[in-house]
Image (tube, rainbow, N blue to C red):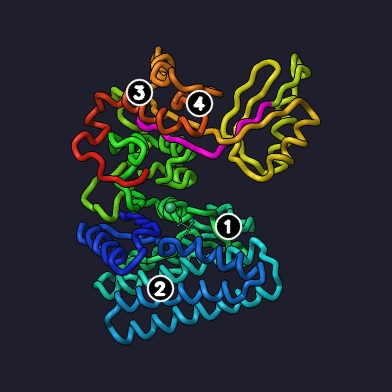
Amino acid sequence: MSLVVMKFGGTSVEDPAAIGRTAAIVAGRIAQGKQAVVVVSAMSKVTDLLLRAAAAAAAGDRTGALAISARLRCRHRDTACALIKDSADSAALQVLIDQKFDSLDEILRGLAAILELTPRISDLIVSYGERISSRIVAAAFRERQIDSVHVDSRDVIVTDSQFQKAAPIDTIIEKRAQEHLNPHISAGRVPVMGGFIASNEAGITTTLGRGGSDFTGALIGGALSAEAIEIWTDVDGIMTADPRVCPDALRVKIISFEEAAELAYFGAKVLHPATILPAVKKNIPVLVLNSRNATCEGTRIASLAPHCNSPFKSIAVKKKLTIIDVVASRMLMSHGYLKEIFTIFDKHQCPVDMVSTSEVSVSLTVDSNDKLPLIAADLSKLADVKYEGKKALVCMVGEDIRGQSGIAAQVFAAIRHINVRMISQGASEINMSFMIEEEDAEEAVRSLHAAFFQNPDPLVFDVEAKKAAVSF
Ligand code: ASP
Ligand code: MG
């Protein structure tokens, strides 16, 4: 039998109605003769609220922190109550939810006394979102005749101890997945697990970083060599552009791993970029699907995408960027200079998005952040430094630009009225990126979309059902 890992995001478990839809989707897969492992996020907005409660407690606002927790307790209790009618199951679940919130409150009180929020405590607090949502979903499945079992992800996803962005240890995960999941799967049960949460080798709770539930789905899919990984969200899939900016945006039916990774990295929010990796390694297709529109076939991310008559698949935009210019004539004819520059970014743990160099200058772009003055101070020991915020990166992705001449001319002709600050095209030749002022971003996307998606290839783009999606 073939195994599918189905990951449902926060909006797919946000309330009783959403959890009901999710159960129906899983039941549908089982009716097709598939085996399933389900990974769920926290109910929507819960992660943000837990972080807010943690921040309030650490700032000494004990009452504020406990008030957030009390509201969350009510929301989870009400959701469970609406979903589970069986009185014994319902009572047991209410007790379990109360126990979890009691221990969360205990931690918040302690934090309000200690007034120091460490990354380790932050992960512990935030883990309650997925720990509780996965319990509710597992119980709701059982109530709907899906033979399901809750599995604590922290027993399966083992990571290093880099709290808030821990790195998974594949070999252990593979072993643990076989140990904790396979017996259930072979017995025909559906394991339900929380995404995002994990533990280190000592069993202390860690998380995979914000948006990390997709990553959990891919890790489980990789460890069990699943047939497919389904990422259920609230949009129809990857679109040619953000439909809020560009009403003509089309759903992309199939895209390659490489293209999707570029898009994810450069701002399209459908997927966590790292999701791609465990799936790529094992050649497992990832499907992005809409739990509010389950019959839509979504976007299939495959190792190879078919050739397509449009050079680009999608246009992504990343805002809130800063351009840093480093200028020094000393760079002329010397080696090791770039290394010195990058060492400084490394020291401040600041990722660089785009780089462009000439003989005497290096331009880099980074997310606008509060470390920039420190980075600039370090860089100014090497060279003259200038930095400027409020920039946007436009990234056009498509494997079919490889080897085609004249594409750059068409791109820049389409946006000739817009001032371009920096350009980059990697040797991989699947993306063309440039920096513009943030305020020009929307206009640029509309002009580029009009220029490149006039005659969309029906094999690759959904030319019929347009505009169903609400966000990119
Ligand atoms: N709940 C986590 C977050 O909001 C993880 C996820 O949903 O992917 O970041
Ligand atoms: Mg997500």
The response on whether ligand 2 sits within 8 Å of label 4 is no
Q: Which residue in the structure is indicated by mark 4?
A: 434
SS label for mark 1: strand
Instruction: Give the residue type at disc 1.
Output: Thr
Q: Which segment did they paint magenta?
A: 312-325
Relative vertical location of residue 66 with respect to residue 310 in this rendering, above or below? below
| Label located before the other in sequence (4 or 2) | 2
Q: Tell me whether circle 4 and circle 2 mark residues in contact (CB < 8 Å).
A: no
- Count the labels in the image: 4
Between 365 and 92, the one nearer to me in the picture: 365
- Residue at 45 percent across and 76 percent down: it is 73
The response on whether ligand 1 sits within 8 Å of label 1 is no
Q: Tell me whether circle 1 and circle 2 mark residues in contact (CB < 8 Å).
A: no
| Label located before the other in sequence (4 or 3) | 3
Q: Which residue in the structure is indicated by mark 3?
A: 311
| Residue 313 belongs to the span the image colors magenta | yes
The image quadrant that residue 208 belongs to is: bottom right
Q: Residues within 10 Å of mark 3 (few under 14, many from 20)?
A: some
Residue 465 spot, x, y in % from top left: 20, 40
Judge left or right: residue 394 versus residue 295: right
Instruction: Give the residue type at disc 3.
Output: Pro
Judge left or right: residue 467 versus residue 206: left
How far apart are the alpha carbons under marks 3 and 2?
47 Å
Q: Which residue in the structure is indicated by mark 1?
A: 159
How far apart are the alpha carbons under marks 4 and 2?
44 Å
Confirm whether residue 58 shows in the render. yes
How far apart are the alpha carbons under marks 1 and 2?
31 Å
| Label located before the other in sequence (1 or 2) | 2
Which of pointers 3 and 1 indicates the residue nearer the eye? 3
| Label located before the other in sequence (3 or 1) | 1
Which of pointers 3 and 2 indicates the residue nearer the eye? 2
How far apart are the alpha carbons under marks 4 and 1?
36 Å
